Image (cartoon, grey):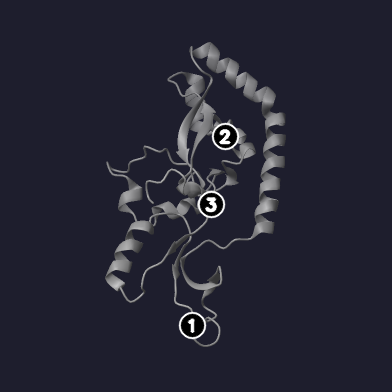
Amino acid sequence: LLAWPLLPQVDRIVVCLDPLERSRLAAVLARIIVLPHPVALAMETPRFGDAPRAMAMLAGAPVAQLSMTPKDDRRALVKRGVDILLSAAALLGLAPFMLLIALALKAEAQGHVIVRSWRYGLNNAVFPAYRFAPGRGRVAGFLAQTGLARLPELLNILRGDMTFVGPAPHPVDLTVEGFDPFLRLSDYAHRHRVKPGLTGLAQI
């Protein structure tokens, strides 16, 4: 499951083990809790009456929610609409400014003006994040220092890979003091229960 290429498209993970096998259950949950997906535990159907109110129902069977993200389809639709409108308007309005930046970068150094780097997104899906090319010149240094190098990420917002406010989109080869935080910190991947953002607490 952890290595399955289609895992980012999974909506929910349901563990079907005997709740009384606590050691085995704990071992399985310890492995998958690092994923950003909602995790539920399948429970036995009650012999009498309905399932307890604390339980959710899935395909007619009760499940206990172990980790989840509240889902509001209407709010998600509105947020996506706002992202599309604002990113399209920003790209159109900033197009002359971004063209000047591109020309300045091209004059300062040869090579690509906009580069892409692979980042983690929603549900750990990998996507290419667009940015102005880094460099050692004045223009590139100014863009990096002011955050303007990230302006091409407006394209990612328009595409649906990112949103305006959210966790920073981490590189796929990210290490912290030499180790992979996804392997060492059990709830680190929970930041990917939402789309990464152009700005957020880390940048502020």
Q: How many labels does the image show?
A: 3
1 and 3 marks in contact (CB < 8 Å) = no
Residue under label 2, please give it.
Answer: 153
Q: In this view, does 122 lie above or below 57?
A: above
Query: Is 166 or 100 nearer to us in this picture?
Result: 166
For the residue carrying disc 1, how many other residues have a C-alpha within 10 Å: few (<14), some (14-19), or many (20+)?
A: few
Q: Which residue is drawn at 44% across and 77% down?
A: 44
Q: Report x, y in % for residue 70.
A: 57, 63
Q: Distance between the residues labelled 2 and 3?
A: 17 Å
Q: Which amino acid does label 2 sit on?
A: Glu
From the viewer's side, name the closer residue of 17 and 73: 17
Element type where label 3 sits in the image: loop
Q: Name the residue under label 3.
A: 194
Per the image, the residue denoted by label 1 is 46
Estimate the spatial distance between the alpha carbons at disc 1 and disc 3, rounded to whole Å. 34 Å
Establish if 43 lies above or below 95: below
Which residue is depicted at the point 64% across and 60% down? 72
Quadrant in which residue 198 is drawn = top right
Residue 75 at what x, y percent from top left? Answer: 67, 57
Please state which amino acid type lies under the numbered disc 1. Answer: Pro
Taking the spot 49% from the left edge, 82% from the top edge, the residue there is: 46
Amino acid type at circle 3 is Val
Q: Nearer the viewer, mark 2 or mark 3?
A: 3
Rounded to the nearest whole Å, what is the CA distance between mark 1 and mark 2? 50 Å
Disc 1, SS: loop
